Amino acid sequence: MRIGTGEQTYTWHENWATLPDTPATRENGRTHALCVTNAGNLIVFAQTRDGLLTYDPAGKLLHATGGDRWLGAHGLTRVVEQDIEYLWLVDQNTAEVAKVTLEGKAVQTLAAPPHPAYEGADAKRYVPTWAAVNTANGDIWVADGYGGSLVHRYNRAGEYLASLSGEEGAGRFNCPHALAFDPSGQLWIADRGNARITIYDADGRHLRHRDGVCHSPCGFSFHADTVLVPELFTGVKLLDLQLNLLAELGGNTDVRDDALDRFTYPPTPIPGWPNWQGTPRIRPGHFNSPHGGCFGPTGDIYVAEWIIGGRVTRLTRG
């Protein structure tokens, strides 16, 4: 099955990779994030036991690790340091932000930030959702998307430096769900509750933003001059680096119209959504609830959806 048009035409590979069929996966198993390694393997971070999963380029499961450590699996970012690949993992349940090897061995963790938002009678819970690393200086940025709606900055040693609230630029964040550095070293923030993408420089100065090009942005992946943005409600957007829309892939109006009619943040639940397995609302060619997405080295696209039991789709060019 083909989707898209013109230069943005892709072949859809339904359930290209599947999660192990276990009681933990059937109970939850939501596939929240993924990345591609230098070897071409796909790593998926899912909310299940042994939820750090590695697949070969054909979609075959190579190994799974983690035990019960990351049952709140959420954010996943790959970094390369001195030719060694690491992953930054974020668990929304335990608030753990950890740098691990590709095999899941932790080499660094970050303490919760000493920010006033988490203190006093009106204290917010710290619920980190994503981490990104500035490769130029090693700074680590963490999005607290589900708690205080803040973005925190640490140095490479894990020492807290500062925080962003959004008020420095476009306005107060409302679920800064994910963040990533683009090839030029600018920090992109998916301010999902505000339907906004905001871009800062490496020192936290607001550069630009755009409202409305995405309705529920969940994160970013970069390939050449193209930006991949998975949208929770639903579809995958392709943008240029100036935040202009190039294409939308796999949009599902059955979901999107219903979701946006109800859109508040946190969103009002849609009956049954996103777990409509076995119904026409989950079908090839249409996404249901994209939560994570990444480019492969040749421009192929991988998408993970927020569905119990998991759904991982591959889109190949042409």
Image (cartoon, rainbow, N blue to C red):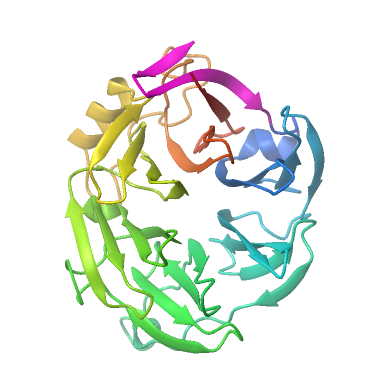
Q: How many marks?
A: 0
* Viewer-nearest residue: 55 or 227: 227
Q: In the image, is 178 to the left or to the right of 77? A: left
Query: Closest to the observer: 290 or 210?
Result: 210
Q: Residue visible at 37% across and 66% down?
A: 186
**Residue drawn at the location 44% of the way across and 80% of the way down:** 153
Instruction: State the image quarter where residue 111 is shown.
Output: bottom right
Horizontal and vertical percent for residue 84? 74, 64
Q: Is residue 82 above or below residue 280?
A: below
Residue 15 in the magenta stretch? The answer is: yes
For the record, the magenta segment spans: 1-18
| Residue 182 in picture, x, y percent from top left | 42, 59
Q: Main secondary structure of the magenta part?
A: strand
Whether residue 234 sits left or right of residue 20 in the image: it is left
Q: Position of residue 75 (x, y in %)?
A: 54, 56
The residue drawn where x is 52% and y is 21% is 277
The x, y position of residue 301, in whole percent, is 52, 34
Residue 255 lies in what quarter of the image?
Answer: top left
Please name the residue shown 34% across and 19% down the image: 6
Q: Is residue 7 above or below residue 138?
A: above
Along the viewing direction, whichever of 80 and 260 lies nearer the viewer: 80
**In magenta segment, residue 178:** no
Q: Nearer the viewer, residue 11 or 18?
A: 11
Up-down: is 75 above or below 261?
Answer: below
